[in-house]
Image (spheres, rainbow, N blue to C red):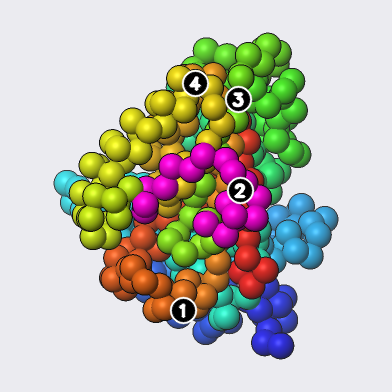
Amino acid sequence: MNENILEMIRRDNFSFPAITQHCPELLSLKQVPQNKAYHAEGDVYRHTEMVCDALKNLPEWQDLRPEEQELLFLAAAFHDIGKKTCTKWEEGIPISPKHTIAGARQFRQMTYRGAGRFGLTFAQREWVANAIRFHGLPVWFWKKARPEAALTKAAESIPLRLLYLLSKADVLGRLTEGENELVGHVEWFAEYAKECSVWERPYPFANPYTRAQFFARDDLWQGSALYDDTDFDVFLLSGLPLAGKDTWIAEHAAGMPVISLDEIREELKLPPAKDSARVARAGTERAKGYLSRKQPFIWNATNIIPETRMRLVRLFSGYRARVHILYLEAPYGELLARNRIRTRHIPEDVLEEMVNKLEVPAPWEAYGVKYHIHPGT
């Protein structure tokens, strides 16, 4: 069996130069400029190398479990990968807006398509992607409109005690006059996370309904205990085409009404990726019929973009439904193979673009979120 990326990281004694030999994508960070006010050390590559060194020198490093060390180091190596595509010049200064979001997506694409090269499980891949996504939170959390909500949301996806270490290494792995101030922010983050009871694990909400309402509203305290007045269940499937959604329905929910956007597309005789808004409107009208009768049903579509999922969750929840998101995933190679023999073949460029857009549902997005992952993923 081939050695996976985590095993290589440990074998090479957590060496950043060594990991770049296996992951040449990291070499693209050379010559990517940074704002000298915060990064006098130079380009993103140099900064990343310093972050990896700083991480290993943290006092807490030796107390981590082996897998935690490996995953944190991998996250450190890729934490700024999004700057390659996001960096632009504004008034003579390089800035990288939303590079954490782009970086998480790029890491997911890279490791999903290159599963054989990286050898990460789904859980490991998403752990690192979320670490990349949230690595700047400890420095700037205090500027959020609801800091406690921002920390509670992040804690649903990654242990904040480990995010703290990544962010602290990110601050120490640079040359800047404001280092002490930034370190202070990160330490403040640690104290606040402990106060909010999300330092070690996600917040222990009173019940699933309170949890869902906390993330859907702006005026709810974590410690509230709301009465669950939901009446019925709606299942919102999510995943790339050919990920196994129809198979799951046949095996686990036979007999339950299904709103399939693919079937609606066939009824309307529309080709893939065309007139999607028209298909969605038709599906929504059918859903409203079930919702008004409080009848459980399944919404079967890709739903790979958070905004689409959130719009549907809000609609269904408005009828007092318990919305359950089920994310399904099949290996990239299996996906391509299934597509080649599919009657309604999806153009490969369309399928690849969907892989590029994929954002796995976060645990906080609905009343319940579960992941059904193919054993080969």
**Which residue is painted at 30% across and 37% down in the image?**
282
Foreground mark, 4 or 3, reads: 4
> Where does residue 337 sit, x and y in percent of width and height?
46, 79
Q: CA distance from mark 2 to mark 1?
A: 26 Å
Q: Nearer the viewer, mark 2 or mark 1?
A: 2
Residue ranking furthest to the bottom: 1
Q: Quadrant of the C terminus?
A: bottom right
Residue indicated by mark 4: 293
Viewer-side residue, 56 vs 225: 225
Q: Which residues are magenta?
A: 246-263
Q: Do the CB atoms of the residues marked 3 and 2 lie less than 8 Å apart?
A: no
Residue type at mark 4: give it: Arg
Instruction: For label 3, count other residues whose C-alpha is less than 10 Å away and answer few (under 14), some (14-19) or many (20+).
Output: some
Q: Position of residue 267 (x, y in %)?
A: 29, 51
The span from disc 3 to disc 2 (Cα, nearest Å) is 17 Å
Left or right: where 87 falls relative to 56: left
**Tag 1 residue:** 337
Query: In the drawing, does residue 60 fall left or right of residue 210?
Result: right
